[in-house]
Image: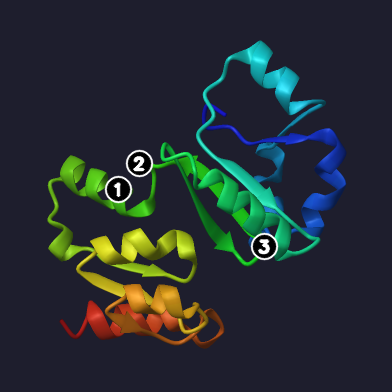
Amino acid sequence: MDNEPYCERKFEQYLPLGTLPEGYLEQFGHCINYIDNYAEFYLQSKKQVYKIYIDCFSGDEILKEMDNRILEDKSISTVFSYHKVLDILPSSVNKGEAIKYLCEHLNIETSNVLAIGDSNNDIEMLQTANYSVAMGGANDKVKAAAKYITYSNFENGVYEAISNIVYKK
């Protein structure tokens, strides 16, 4: 909410067990605001909600059901950013739109943009950038959105992509 992360206090113990990227809690954990009850906090604070991040340990079925129900509302979009993480966002918000905004703001053509991604929330970004690269460990949907496929994160895929596209261009 209003560019600050919030977590209900009762879920704090589960954060280290979830699917947050490695090192996230060490680097950004101090920024998380712990609250007692989301609904009460939201109604009292009147803060703007930009994204809801749902991490599900128990299985994909719950997330898929939520995803199907949410898709009925066209003002909201959902994307699986990690295997068991569902992001809920306004339908106009995605990384592709962010690249367009940045390019316009910085007066750069999207034809000069290199984007590298590995998750479903990277698809619009890969479709927008002229030089789009999927990591080797990405799923088939992400790979289909990219023009190039590189090695995995563990095989220096980002380095390979930059070396082969930027420096051999």
Q: Earlier in the sequence, mark 1 or mark 2?
A: 2
Q: Earlier in the sequence, mark 3 or mark 2?
A: 3
Give amino acid for label 1.
Answer: Glu
Residue located beneath label 3 in the image: 84
The image quarter in which residue 124 lies: bottom left
Q: Earlier in the sequence, mark 1 or mark 3?
A: 3
Q: How is the image coloured?
A: rainbow
Front: mark 1 or 3:
3
Residue located beneath label 2 in the image: 92
Residue located beneath label 1 in the image: 97
The image quarter in which residue 49 lies: top right
Neighbour class for label 2 at 10 Å: few (<14), some, many (≥20)?
A: few
Estimate the x, y position of residue 145 in percent, counting from the top left.
33, 73
Estimate the x, y position of residue 11 in percent, counting from the top left.
82, 42
Q: Nearer the viewer, residue 71 or 106?
A: 71
Which residue is found at the position 67% from the left and 48% from the top? 54
Image marks 1 and 2: residues in contact by CB distance under 8 Å: yes
Quarter of the picture holding the C terminus:
bottom left
Question: From what the image shows, is residue 52 above or below residue 109?
Answer: above
Q: Is 83 placed left or right of 12 in the picture?
A: left
